[in-house]
Amino acid sequence: MADLILHHFAGSPFSEKVRLMLGYKQLAWKSVTVPSILPKPDVLALTGGYRRTPFLQIGADIYCDTALIAQVLERLQSSPSLYPQQGRALASILAQWADDALFWAAVTYNRGASAELPPAVFEDRRAMGFDVDWWRPDDAAPAYRAYVQRLSEMLSDQPYLLGQQPCLADFSAYHALWLVHLRQGATVQVPPQATALRGWLGRMQSIGHGHAAPLDAAHAIAIAADSQPAALGCNLLDDGEFRDEHGLAPGSRVAISAQSFGREPTEGELVAATPQHYSLRRVDPRAGLLHVHFPRIGYVLKQL
Ligand SMILES: N[C@@H](CCC(=O)N[C@@H](CS)C(=O)NCC(=O)O)C(=O)O
């Protein structure tokens, strides 16, 4: 099995979600630090356009988005599971809420509570589609506090959000709160009345990041160039039958982009379209032949 290579940066909440999932499964991984703003030439050599953080590389397979990365990690190592046997769908739906509603409330609240972003980061995020006027910190703060209160209630009689063990939903909720309360430089305290939440944050934090070894980006690209993408049907996703709702045949040239925030597209040939994900085949001058995988939820596909 090729190494797991996580491309991430220390202050990225979605990266923290994956670092902790790797720790939970006690997986060994290689750590490539990516820039937090454009330009990102080494990132784009691998993803072909997708610029969000993090992404997971296994040889010449590139897995974008933490929802898809969670599925891949589960395939790699099923125990301990990220998906409870009872409530698998609930865990995914709660995780999606946390990655979206809770995360944006946390980001906006944090913007009001902490030092402003450095101007270059601010401009980069604005170009990605983060509209600072859309939601003000003063509006986000009560929403964030209400969400924190609800989470704390969920934790009042059980150690994790959906039971006795952490699941995907815990990792998603954790990274948003980590941004506000635990990330290096965070200044905001957990509200004193959220006692159950405080205990849960501590339990989640103690999971740790597993076994990471640093790797530089040039090396990661060389690994991709020396590898072949896993054969479709034998990789870490449920490939199944090709089923595209846009009426496209396998091999069609398409562009896939995030639905919101960071819409830079990845172009390639559509080689897999399953109920859960898409895979694109693309060739990069430095990284060679790659398969780049995206979840369906949260992404749009256009024919070129
Ligand atoms: N839905 C995506 C969201 C990823 C995301 O928004 N990541 C932030 C960092 S935490 C980002 O991409 N920021 C801009 C960048 O790193 O270029 C996922 O689950 O991976």
Image: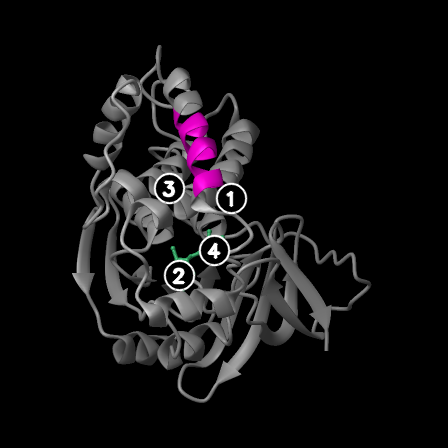
Q: Earlier in the sequence, mark 1 or mark 4?
A: 4
Identify the disc placed on residue 176: 3
- Residue, disc 2: 53
Marks 1 and 4 sit apart, C-alpha to C-alpha, by 13 Å
Residue 228 seen in the figure: no
Name the quadrant containing residue 115: bottom left
Q: Residues within 10 Å of mark 2 (few under 14, many from 20)?
A: many
Say if residue 114 shows up in the picture.
yes
Earlier sequence position, callout 1 versus callout 2:
2
Quadrant field for ligand 1: bottom left
Amino acid on which disc 2 is placed: Thr
Q: Name the residue tied to disc 1.
A: 100
| Tag nearer the camera, 1 or 2 | 1
* Quarter that holds the C terminus: bottom right
For mark 4, give the secondary structure: loop
The image shows residue 214 at horizontal and vertical percentages of 18, 65
